[in-house]
Image: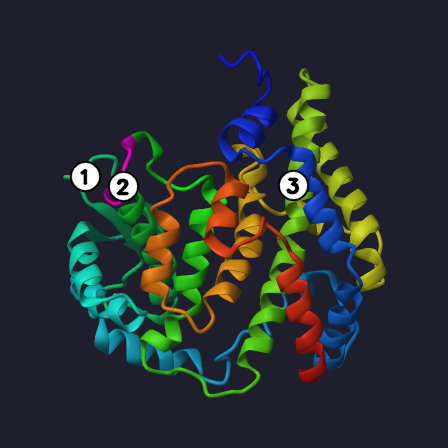
């Protein structure tokens, strides 16, 4: 029981995330109200050659490396990783390709065990220094495919963070990172480098601009979903006796409200319920905001890491441990959590991507 945090909303934001709900909401609303949104929307419409439709909120066309067909990537990955143990055995090499020293890679790799997942990927960090972190990803009988590898890279980011913040933080009670958004940030940084690890690093001069636009559009989508999540849980506290049917109506109503305020002007369509599609918002209380926070933090960290060594910098950041988020961020990149680096990168990208 937390006398100072009497609701789950307060417990999630102020006790677990350590960033007040109002601060998170202000970050999201300022981002999805930015002038860059309409500009990127017009660019997507131009690239599609048709008017935007609600499902274009998931437009995938900015992903760098899209020039390589997924079937080709599948062949490369399957040959390299016929089973989970092949991937596990290559973690040391993957880390060294990412910029970790041989000493770091030899310290981290044996502390990560890879398991085959039945469902989605997952990273389960250890709580005892004698135990291993567990990385789970889908590996069909025919061998790992590109999708499984991409997920594995994301989960590897989690596992490396979990290992560093357990093994290297000097005070056990401070193990970990400030909140889930920070481990998501490292996971996104690793996931972004999947093609580099396969030796398929793109020489496309526009790659960093496409990456900025991809991050931006993904964040724009999930911030809207997160606002729906936050508003729905506030509605539930105002209506504690609500029936499932009333909750369903409220979710759809809130989704339309958020859509009309922040998306209708870009898409030219009103009253769309598409932001209500995530089941997370009911069974994982207000977890969704960790994703857009993760995007913003990941881009900020990625932007800072440009030209620097990932292995050295990640360890330096991680050993700060589970301290207050804004202090952690200042220590990591020299400034508090901010969407400005991403918005500035989008402004620059719009000059190059047509």
Which residue corresponds to the image point at 28% horizontal and 73% vertical from the top-left? 97
Residue 48 in the image: above or below residue 255: below
Which residue corresponds to the image point at 40% horizontal and 37% vertical from the top-left? 322
Which residue corresponds to the image point at 41% horizontal and 42% vertical from the top-left? 177
Looking at marks 3 and 1 on the same chain, the residue that comes earlier in the sequence is marked by: 3
For residue 24, the mark is: 3
Left/right of residue 121 with respect to residue 223 in the rendered view: left
Disc 2, SS: helix
**Which span of residues is magenta-colored?**
167-172
Looking at marks 3 and 2 on the same chain, the residue that comes earlier in the sequence is marked by: 3
Query: Considering depth in this image, is 330 or 200 the residue closer to the camera?
Result: 330
In whole angstroms, how far apart are the C-alphas of marks 3 and 1?
33 Å
Residue 202 in the image: above or below residue 118: below
For residue 62, the mark is: none
Q: Is residue 255 magenta?
A: no
Q: Position of residue 188 (x, y in %)?
A: 45, 59
Disc 3, SS: helix
Instruction: Determine which residue is flagged by label 2.
Output: 166
In whole angstroms, how far apart are the C-alphas of marks 2 and 1?
7 Å
Looking at marks 2 and 1 on the same chain, the residue that comes earlier in the sequence is marked by: 1
Instruction: Determine which residue is flagged by label 1.
Output: 129
Dots 2, 1 in contact, CB < 8 A:
yes
* Label 2 Cα crowd, 10 Å radius (few <14 / some 14-19 / many 20+): many
Q: Main secondary structure of the magenta part?
A: loop
Look at the image and name its color scheme. rainbow
Disc 1, SS: loop
């Amino acid at each position: 029981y937390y006398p100072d945090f009497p609701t789950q909303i307060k417990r999630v934001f102020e006790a677990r995330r350590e960033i007040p709900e109002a601060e998170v909401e202000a970050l999201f609303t300022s981002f999805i109200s930015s002038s860059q949104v309409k500009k990127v929307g017009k660019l997507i419409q131009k690239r599609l050659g048709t008017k935007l439709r609600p499902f274009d909120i998931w437009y995938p066309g900015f992903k760098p490396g899209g020039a390589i067909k997924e079937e080709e990537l599948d062949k490369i990955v399957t040959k390299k990783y016929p089973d989970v143990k092949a991937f596990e055995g290559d973690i040391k090499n993957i880390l060294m390709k990412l910029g970790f020293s041989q000493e770091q890679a030899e310290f981290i790799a044996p502390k990560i065990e890879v398991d085959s997942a039945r469902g989605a990927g997952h990273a389960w960090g250890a709580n005892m220094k004698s135990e291993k972190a567990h990385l789970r990803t889908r590996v069909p009988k025919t061998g790992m495919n590109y999708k499984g590898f991409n997920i594995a890279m994301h989960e590897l980011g989690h596992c490396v963070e979990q290992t560093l913040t357990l093994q290297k933080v000097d005070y056990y009670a401070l193990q970990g990172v400030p909140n889930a958004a920070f481990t998501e940030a490292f996971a996104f940084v690793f996931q972004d480098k999947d093609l580099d690890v396969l030796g398929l690093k793109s020489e496309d001069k526009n790659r960093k601009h496409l990456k900025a636009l991809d991050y931006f559009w993904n964040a724009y989508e999930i911030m809207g979903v997160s606002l729906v999540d936050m508003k729905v849980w506030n509605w539930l506290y105002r209506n504690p006796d609500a029936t499932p049917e009333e909750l369903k109506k409220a979710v759809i109503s809130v989704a339309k409200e958020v859509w009309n305020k922040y998306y209708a002007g870009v898409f030219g369509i009103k009253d769309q319920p598409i932001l209500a599609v995530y089941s997370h918002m009911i069974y994982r209380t207000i977890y969704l905001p960790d994703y857009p926070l993760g995007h913003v933090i990941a881009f900020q960290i990625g932007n800072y890491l440009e030209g620097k060594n990932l292995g050295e910098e990640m360890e330096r950041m991680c050993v700060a441990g589970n301290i207050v988020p804004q202090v952690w961020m200042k220590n990591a990149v020299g400034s508090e959590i901010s969407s400005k680096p991403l918005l500035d990168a989008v402004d620059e990208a719009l000059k190059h991507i047509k």
